[in-house]
Amino acid sequence: MKYIDEFREGDLARAIAGAIAREAAGSRSYDLMEFCGGHTHAISRYGIADLLPGNVRMIHGPGCPVCVLPIGRIDNAIELAQRPGLILATYADTVRVPASKSMSLLKAKARGADVRMVYSSADALRIAQENPDREVVFFAIGFETTTPPTAVAIRQARALGLTNFSVFCNHVLTPSAITNILESPEVRELGTVPLDGFIGPAHVSTVIGSQPYEFFAEEFGKPVVIAGFEPLDVMQAILMLVRQLNDGRAEVENEFTRAVTRDGNVKAKALIAEVFELRDSFEWRGLGEVPYSALRIRPAFREFDAEARYRIEYRSVPDNKACECGAILRGVKKPTDCKVFGTVCTPENPIGSCMVSSEGACAAHYTYGRFKDVPIVPGEASAAGPSQGARSSPSGGGAAATGASLVAQP
Amino acid sequence: MCLAIPACVVALAADDTAIIDLGGVRKSISTALVDDVQVGDYVVVHVGYALARLDPEQAQRTLELFASAGIVADATAMDRA
Amino acid sequence: MSKVREGYVRPVDFKHGRIDMSHGSGGRAMAQLIDELFLREFDNDWLRAGNDFSSMAMPPGRLVMATDSHVVSPLFFPGGDIGCLAVHGTLNDVAMSGARPLYLAATFVLEEGFPLADLRRIVASMANAAREAGVPIVTGDTKVVERGKGDGVFITTTGVGCVPEGVVIAGDRARPGDAILVSGTLGDHGVAIMSLRENLTFETTIESDTAALHDLVARMIDAVPEIHCLRDPTRGGLATTLNELATQSRCGMMIRENDLPVKPQVAAACEFLGLDPLYVANEGKLVAILPGEHADSLLAAMRAHPLGRDAARIGTVHDDPHGFVQMETAFGGRRNVDWLTGEQLPRIC
């Protein structure tokens, strides 16, 4: 597959890994956050952490729109789905997320709610056209990548004169989330951000461009490298961040030049501005209320706004007290620092946002990296170097490391 | 987030739609968000919409950049936004 | 004078007719359906005897039995349908013990309103699959449920077979040092099904790989009697099967991503939907685990068979009390290949 396979070449990966190791040699540490859940997934799926030296740590950020969707909003979606005759169209990512009273959209479906999984907002429109006597609500989630498709659907609904279609809007914004991380309580306590740099999201950036990140570089003095979606892109971006940090630079660089420009997709941005406006505040699961971080449908398109149409009342539902997702999303704790990780909280039974979607930090670590938490079995070829994301006991014996933080053997 | 894939436009159709091909799999998608899409263009596709056109020259430069890792990077090869 | 022909019974209307509650009542309508459809298609002496049981001779050896329910939707898909899937699935489960499948039973739960044209198509497909496999369907049952209480049709098949003495193949027999082989490309069936699912339609020439594997298994055992484990990676894909075997055998596994055979179109479809081919269902493939020194002989035997042309060695079993299945990625890194969480669904993230 063109533009995919070439960006997954193992030999090139090793060459870039060699460069990273050489240029990160030294005593300082490099704590880099990849904001985007897709990057978290790529890092886990390709085992990129294995190719990095021990002092380059990847911290998984809150860029997973499913993970940060508050329980209360899913409760609202379930309530909508349970309205007699209503069809709720949703991306498949949301259906397993546990909400209040042990419910989920999938369970609501099992009990008779008409929940339909769609690949695209265009499919939701089609359902509305094919079922003129039923109310159809599209459960819209996602960052700036997914927002323009919702805008197009709403405008098309108007052009078609549909009266049975509306959107339950949960679109959120990337720059606000990054600001929230950089201004977190830990930062106020420590007086410093425990992060050295960011890998910027790939596809969000095709829409918003590289320009919005300049604020972070200037205001907080942290370098940002926008990386493509493939594992080689991620490795190259890590190398570029290491170089910036070594040089003492804090700039916005673009590794994903084949799809991202400084201005982004102007047409898509205009469409977003036409259909949506900023909410003053929006609750993010694990992060609490974040100002100017989410969108709602403008009054001009009110008839397509499910919140107005159905008078939806939002009720905030707190997370389990043992849940460390907030700290994990901000990069100050690791999945293995959480008392319930891997025991009570697993992908089958997720307690908090980081376990809920396969790209959440905890889910990714559990699914792909859990073997690094236990002593390496003698006789087996050892993994390359100390692992990322969790401290593991080195080969040659030692106590089991699950849940505990042990220092890797020098 | 935002699972998106680069795919080749093999046909244009009515109402801002196109047929794309990825590894022999074809799908109909919307081109409402990208102007002037032509057959032969590669586009980034997310949830059934083209979000951006891929620049083949930049793609090539990026691949060369990977290959040159370990050699002192050519400053002009990196795009400083 | 009556114009009714003597002895005339109006034939079942397979073109336009539908299942109704009378077809399950045990009365004349049911008997007629059985006669004109099931007996006609499956066509053997056991069924023609008309008993509620069938009696067969058993060759020497150990009896093996397996059963499977089939609830696939859509009922008809590229490369097959629920009928042949039901036959192949149970034949394969029996064959994974090293047994030669001998007889099948089939039960149908039909939903009121189900079109008889579809039912005939499914039953004909089953009959064809059974004939090609050389395994008769010797007994069965039919029930009808009210509209809304069934998904068109549910089929359960049960199979019996016979394992010769000395052949011991089971999930707990994998040992450190064993080689792990697969018989062909991964993910074909699951992708073929997804291509039809509502709202996910895309054009593709991928067909389900549904097939009866017992002949391939027989060739494999002839070539290498020392095979330790056989299993077909159906729901949950290869990853689930390997995790099951690792757990049963209490050992670990390491597979290599570069060695996994996947058709380019299947890989592309999985990219589209955010699926991992490791977790996508197969219906005509098997995993074999055997002592490493015989791997090459077994591969040669598999590749000589039409259903094993793309057979490949994908990994090795090693000592690991945790039973982790791990993979060396194409990238050179290492990751867990964990159990599937819930059903694999497409994702946007």
Image (spheres, rainbow, N blue to C red):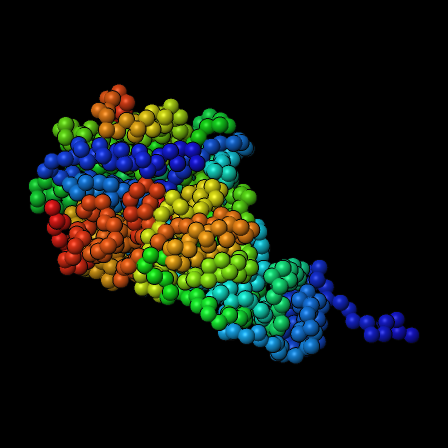
Q: Determine the residue located farthest toward the top in the rendered image.
A: B76
Residue occupying image coordinates x 13% and y 53%: A406
Residue A130 or residue A24, whichever sits in front? A24
Q: Quadrant of residue A59?
A: top left
Relative vertical location of residue C35 with respect to residue A175 in this rendering, above or below:
below
Residue A246 located left or right of residue C31: left
Spot occupied by residue A364 in the image (x, y as percentages of width and height): 28, 50
Residue drawn where x is 55% and y is 49% of the image: C207
- The spot of residue C268 in percent (x, y) is 45, 41
Q: Quadrant of residue C146?
A: bottom right
Which corner quadrant holds the C terminus of chain C? Answer: top left
Can you see residue C37? Answer: no
Horizontal and vertical percent for residue A292? 25, 40
**Residue A321 at what x, y percent from top left?**
19, 60
Please say if A234 is above or below C102.
above
In the image: residue A363, left or right of residue C114? left
Rendered residue at 85%/72% (across/down): C4
**Left or right of C49, for residue A288:** left
